Image: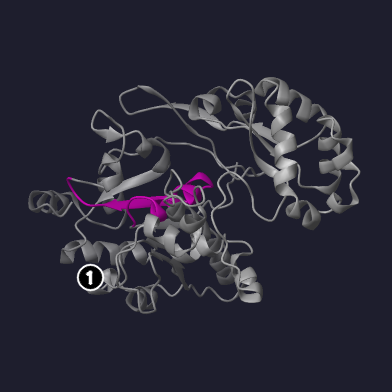
Amino acid sequence: MTKPLQGIRVLEMGQLIAGPFAGKMLAEFGAQVTKVEPPVTGDPLRKWRLLHEGTSVWWAAQSRNKESLTLDLRSPEGQDVIRKLVADSDVLIENFRPGTLEGWGLGWDELHALNPGLIMLRVSGYGQTGPYRDRPGFGVVAEAMGGLRHLSGEPGRTPVRVGISIGDSLSALHGVIGILLALRHRDQNGGEGQMIDVALYESVFNMMESLLPEYSTFGTVRQPAGSSLPGIAPSNAYRCSDGKYALIAGNGDSIFRRLMDLIGRRDLAEDPALAQNDGRVKSVERIDVAIAEWTSTQTLENVLAALNEARIPAGKIYDVADIADDPHYLARDMILETQLPDGTPIKVPGVVPKLSATPGTVDTLAPTLGQHTDTVLGRIGIDNQTRDAWRARGII
């Protein structure tokens, strides 16, 4: 089966999350992704969170389908290798601080002149321009600057972070969109590549829905609201008799009426003031109390069964144990069973999005450090004797 990105050659020079997550997605849909890592240490992600035999199990998901090339980018020889690889690449991904590649003689102008068809994704905290461009930027800072951290948590308490590096992953997704757009443009307009500038904070800010229009029009500074969804009612987490929480989204007009009928509050279902969302928002506390009184008398299982029967969007709060055993996840191939290099079984997330004719797949395990160095260098004509000399000097 031909995959949609088959034949596309990607050079991944990023580390940790934002750049490599973009490379992962491209590799799942057929691109040949060659990941460049520092000799000896490799990508720092190899040592993040829980390790098995010295390597993060996160690595098994983040770097599947990729080649690993070790290369000292600070050396003239390493920089020359990059130029040779770029000459035959379609896409280059990097997430260094702005100016780093320019300092190595590998900036956009140089690489574009070498390969006019090259598409270069640059992911950084603040972007390649502007007064903050030179600041170090991690996802946690971008999430705060983009507006997300201010909205997270309970009113009056310390703002909390989302439990994952969501700013990095959102930036990777925006980067993949940019790459696909640039590939389309290149195919239609004479083979010219372009540079894609993705800033972590902008990727977060792009998700902030009505935040800015509301401030611009009404001067409203949206505040954290815990488990509720301000301005859309009812939508909240409601405690059940067994201490678990049901997430109920009864904010559609007809859904709201069915929900009120289900909980025995026909008076609220027929109240004309609550027929549409703007009216319900004004009475959200009264509505939430009515729903909570109903859920408090039943177990979570019974609450969800009744809500599903009434076609009201609802669910429970999943932890990873729930996810790993959930029949819907399993039926849609979202839990893949694979193995680590030593044969240890491991489960990793499936591939999204799901294409009907050319779906993405996991074809190879995440590489060991430098596993493909000889193969990649051989492709560009670096002979065995030269490679041996470079190894002795720590270049590869």
Give neighbour class at mark 1: few <14, some 14-19, many 20+ (Cα, 10 Å): some
Q: Position of residue 365 (x, y in %)?
A: 39, 35
- Does 22 lie within the magenta span? yes
Q: What residue sits 52% from the left and 64% below the top?
A: 205
Q: Position of residue 299 (x, y in %)?
A: 66, 20
Picture quarter containing residue 96? bottom left
Q: Which residue is mark 1?
A: 104
- Does 162 lie within the magenta span? no
Image mark count: 1
Q: Position of residue 348 (x, y in %)?
A: 46, 32
Task: Name the quadrant of the N terminus.
Answer: top right
Q: Nearer the viewer, residue 203 or 107?
A: 203
Rendering colour mode? one colour
Q: Is residue 359 left or right of residue 33?
A: right
Q: Position of residue 265 (x, y in %)?
A: 84, 35
Magenta range is 14-40
Q: Is residue 394 left or right of residue 236?
A: left
Residue 30 seen in render? yes
The image shows residue 275, relative to residue 191, as above or below, that is above
Q: Is residue 211 left or right of residue 113?
A: right
Q: Nearer the viewer, residue 127 or 77?
A: 127
Q: Secondary structure at mark 1?
A: loop
Picture quarter containing residue 360? top right
Residue 90 seen in render? no
Q: What residue sits 51% from the left and 51% below the top?
A: 155
Q: What residue sits 28% from the left and 69% below the top?
A: 101
Q: What residue sits 80% from the left and 55% below the top?
A: 279
Q: Amino acid at mark 1?
A: Trp
